[in-house]
Image (cartoon, grey):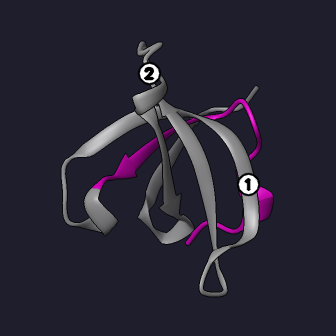
Amino acid sequence: MLTINDVKQGDTVKVRSSFGGGPVVTGVVSGVFADIKRGYPGIDYKLNGCEDPASERWAYLDQVDEVVKNK
């Protein structure tokens, strides 16, 4: 399981969308938080290749399957 020390702003990650029940998406981390919601660690990320502001998302850290590339 990943910790907040394993993920950094600028990393590319694979995330299970829809609170872990959806398809895996790839995004770039824009923020890492010890408490993103309700005391759980998480990230803010932007979908890869998408400039639309609606591509900004957040996820609990346990939804992150893999850190693909560290900046």
Q: Are marks 2 and 1 in contact (CB under 8 Å)?
A: no
Which residue is label 1 attached to?
32
Q: In the image, residue 33 lies at what x, y percent?
A: 74, 63
Number of numbered tags placed on the structure image: 2
Mark 1 burial class by Cα count in 10 Å: few <14, some 14-19, many 20+: many
Which amino acid does the dot numbered 1 rest on? Val
Taking the magenta stretch, the answer to whether it contains residue 2 is: yes
Mark 2 burial class by Cα count in 10 Å: few <14, some 14-19, many 20+: some
Q: In the image, residue 12 lies at what x, y percent?
A: 57, 32
Name the residue at the left extreme: 22
Q: Is residue 55 above or below residue 15?
A: above
Residue 69 is marked as none
Which amino acid does the dot numbered 2 rest on? Asn
Q: In the image, residue 3 lies at what x, y percent?
A: 69, 68
Magenta span: 1-17
Please name the residue shown 48% across and 25% down the image. 53
